[in-house]
Image (tube, helix red, strand yellow):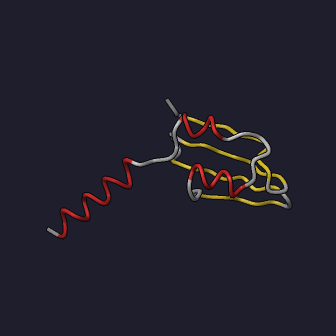
Amino acid sequence: MRYIFILFALFLMLGCSKVTQENYKKITPGMNYDAVVNILGKPNSCDSVANSTSCVWGSISKNIKVRFVNNRAVVISSQGLE
């Protein structure tokens, strides 16, 4: 029974990705980091240099990338969304 619960929880996590075309369209230039996280959840990775931070949500083949300057979205791109 315990394994069934674990498999069910894993299925829910994999099936509830927020990396979708619909959510991509909600992100607009000027949004702050917290607003983007409210839409997409916690990013998979972020890299910062000076006052610029680039974050990625999703995988190599299906992702949304946002570059923030002074905590505001300035470049928004996606790959593999349908």
Residue at image point 25% right, 59% down? 7
Residue lying furthest bottom in this view?
2
Residue at image point 34% right, 53% down? 12
Number of marks in picture: 0
Image side of residue 12 versus residue 79, left or right: left
Image side of residue 28 versus residue 45, left or right: right
Q: Is residue 58 above or below residue 7?
A: above
Quarter of the picture containing the N terminus is bottom left
Quadrant in the rendering for residue 46: bottom right
Residue lying furthest top in this view?
82
Residue 17 or 49: which is nearer the viewer? 17
Residue lying furthest left in this view?
1
Image side of residue 11 versus residue 43, left or right: left
- Measured as percent of width and height from the top left, residue 69 is found at 83, 52
Q: Is residue 9 above or below residue 17?
A: below
Q: Is residue 66 above or below residue 42?
A: above
- Measured as percent of width and height from the top left, residue 6 is found at 26, 64
Quadrant in the rendering for residue 21: top right
Residue at image point 62% right, 55% down? 37
Image side of residue 8 versus residue 79, left or right: left
Residue at image point 76% right, 56% down? 53
Quadrant in the rendering for residue 13: bottom left
- Measured as percent of width and height from the top left, residue 68 is found at 77, 51
- Measured as percent of width and height from the top left, residue 74 is found at 79, 43
